[in-house]
Amino acid sequence: MNLTTENFNAMYSDWLTPNTAVLGILLTMGTLGNSFALYLYIVRVPHTDERFFIPYLGAVDLFVCLWSGTFAIILNFYRADFPSAKLCKVMYFFSWGSINYSALLLLIIAFHRYKKICRPVSLQWTKRKSRLAVGVAGFISYLLTVPILVLFGERKGHIIYTGTNVTLITCNIMSFTREVSFYYLGFIILYFIISMTLIIILYSLIGLTIFRTFRVIRASRKVQNHITFDRGHESTISEVSNTTMEASMSTFKDVKKENQTQIKNVIRKHVRQNFTGMFAAIIVFWVISYLPTITLIIIPAVKNSIEFWFHMDPVATNVLLFLNRAFLLNHVVNPFIYGYFDVGFRKEAANLFCCHKMLAN
């Protein structure tokens, strides 16, 4: 049987139909969800310091879903017969660059939350510094990705399928750059591991600070309730003069004013901690979804074999490819996390849907 590259590629792309369908769903959900989130945060939701980084993160999530999701679908159709080396380089460059950008943004957000929660009296970032940090993160992310334009491209190889020698043309690490590519991939993986570690450390410190704050608030409330009870008990067994009444009224006003200030501070702390919880949830999903991807980058790179993705049965191939692209889940799920934690976002989303429903009726 004479099995050409084109015939094998057509057969292999048919095998990957379930994975392509899943990618199509993720691409649609990620594009619609992040576009909707960007519209709300830019146009309708109040711009506050707590929400400053969300539009930037949403824009990167949207780009990752569109670019990396489309690239993954293209790879499914041309896994064994990729049509262009230049297309391979460009698609990998912007895909990895945006992924690096997302990781750096999450690290910046973690440091920003740490400053607000753990070091509230220290010098905080201004919006100008925050914008500068976002810009520098983008520059560094794509600068780190420049080697991909040299290391990745068209790679030819051969496999034996049902006794027939089949020539493959893949979009992959080029064979002549093997040693350099190995060190570069090691550097990128180390970069992700260090980023994850730093983020986990920062959020652990933030969580510890929030826990201590809640414990102090709970203890102060118990003391305040005890003092209030004692004062009430004493007032029932003593005679109150006019002078004492005036003093009491003055004290009541002072206490009322103090309580209002305390309530505002409690609300402010609650909002800050709520947004901290939101970003913590985003990072948990980021770690969980990227670990399979990183693992399935390391294994083929260590084996350095073009056969890795072509020696398995269709079911195993689809499962492993889904895990390889699991990082997309992180960028798809973020708008749902915004909706769960951000009351302002949820309120504006509900108002928007209600208005459209009323107009439709």
Image: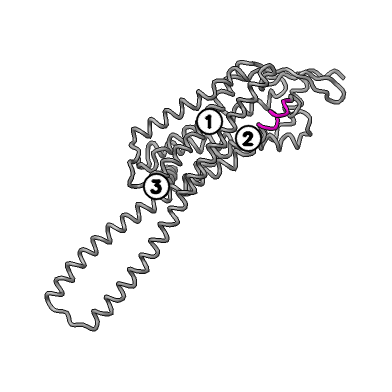
Residue on which disc 1 sits: 100
Identify which residue is drawn at 55% across, 32% down: 191
Secondary structure mostly seen in magenta is helix
Query: How are the colours assigned in the image?
Result: one colour
Residue under label 2: 294
Q: Of helix, strand and loop, which one carries label 3?
A: helix
Label located before the other in sequence (1 or 2) = 1
Q: Residue furthest left?
A: 243
Depth check: 110 or 314 in front?
Answer: 110
Left or right of 157 in this view: 239: left
**Label 1–label 2 contact, CB within 8 A:** no
The magenta segment is 297-304
164 versus 60 height, above or below:
above
Tell whether position 299 is magenta.
yes
Above/below status of 358 relative to 311: below
Type of the residue with mark 3 = Gly
- At which x and y percent is residue 90? 57, 20
* Residue drawn at x 23%, y 60% as measured from the top left: 257
The residue nearer to you, when weighing 200 against 333, is 200
Q: Residue at x 51, y 46 (%)?
A: 281
Q: Amino acid at mark 2?
A: Ile
The alpha-carbon separation of the residues under discs 1 and 2 comes to 13 Å
Q: Residue at (32%, 47%) from the top-left corner?
A: 121
Residue 22 colored in magenta in the image: no
Examine the rendering and report whether any part of residue 217 can be seen: yes
- Image: 292 above or below 165: below
